[in-house]
Amino acid sequence: MLTHLPYSLARDEKRALMMERLRGLTLHHYEHCAAYRRILDAQGTDIDSLNAIEDIPLLPVSLFKNIDLLSVEPEQVVKTMTSSGTTGQAVSKIYLDKATATGQQKTLVKIVNDFLGTSRMPLLIIDSPSVMKDRRLFSARGAGILGFSIFGADKTYALNDDMTLNLDAVRAFLAKHQGRSVLLFGFTFMVWQHFYKSLLALDEKLDLSAGILIHGGGWKKLQSEAVSPADFSAALHGVCGIPRVHDYYGMVEQTGCIYMQCEAGHLHASIFSDIIIRDHHDFSVCQHGQPGIIQVLSLLPESYPGHSLLTEDQGVILGEDDCVCGRKGKYFKILGRVKNAELRGCSDTYAAQF
């Protein structure tokens, strides 16, 4: 799949390639993960009879908080990822071997390069440097910064360790790279609370007219403040002139397979992943335009059975292969968390402190 452009396959060709890989992953994890095998046996799953991606058995994403699920020997694990969570919450633990970790990084590069191009840009991180030093914070938040750092050069942190805006550092960064395109990365609430609101309070006008912002991690806090994605982009443009803002949807349980927001404001599934919407009542597949619970599929997880997961997010598929941006694949919208579900995203769990 890495030989293809990330949004180049139309529905039938993508489904055929995905089905072959997903059936293979299901068999691989059945043979190598005892807990996964017991789950499938209890459901009476016949792997040979799986004929459509909608038939691939799914696991609730919360299961990774409760039990260790891995399909490799413990000594093959090179990295253990943990999800973000508020104080007292259990966190997901995702065990990566070298092959899975490498596949995640290669896939992330393919997807993001489709939006940014292949040239590395000076990177302004809307976070504090302490997040990379404190192992307690180095979960999905630290992994997100580390993952997107590969697209940047000459990294600068925009916030101090107390999360106040380091205006001197930001000004020095912009002066050094004047006239060049620059990349900004941060989690949605932190960008809003500590970057946008600080610039507004200081009445400081920065020139980021050559900037591109990528942000993610959840909208719950901003939705409570009645801030829509369009409002978010417009407000940032007002204080610093930034012309391009891309949200993304992703989770530590399927790192690498992020769903980037296109120029038309739609989140897109690449050829490395897919999305299915399930009905709240019976988990049947919803038609396009019908809201429900999001199921995510990924071709990457080999060291743990995370290739088909039922999330705790609600969404709606808006279309497939016909987005005005020209990218093929399904495109969709996030509607929020399932009622009574725990907060998850890096942005939302951080915002819960406010």
Image (cartoon, rainbow, N blue to C red):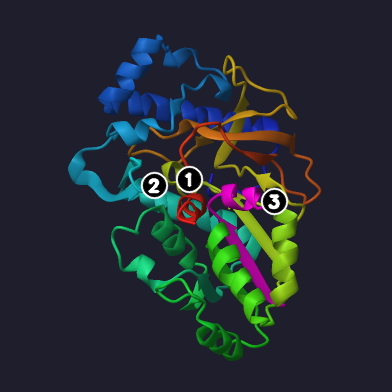
The residue sitting at the left extreme is 75
Circle 3 residue:
226
Kindly tell me whether residue 24 is visible in this rendering: no
Q: Are marks 2 and 1 in contact (CB under 8 Å)?
A: yes
Kindly tell me whether residue 232 is visible in this rendering: yes
Q: Secondary structure at mark 1?
A: loop
Number of marks in the rendered image: 3
Circle 2 residue:
83
Left or right for 348, reference 135: right
Judging depth in this view, the residue of 87 and 331 nearest the camera is: 87
Q: Amino acid at mark 3?
A: Ala
Q: Amino acid at mark 2?
A: Ser
Q: Amino acid at mark 1?
A: Met
Q: Residues within 10 Å of mark 3 (few under 14, many from 20)?
A: few
Give, as a single range, the part of the protein colored magenta.
Answer: 209-226
Question: Is 43 included in the stretch rendered in magenta?
Answer: no
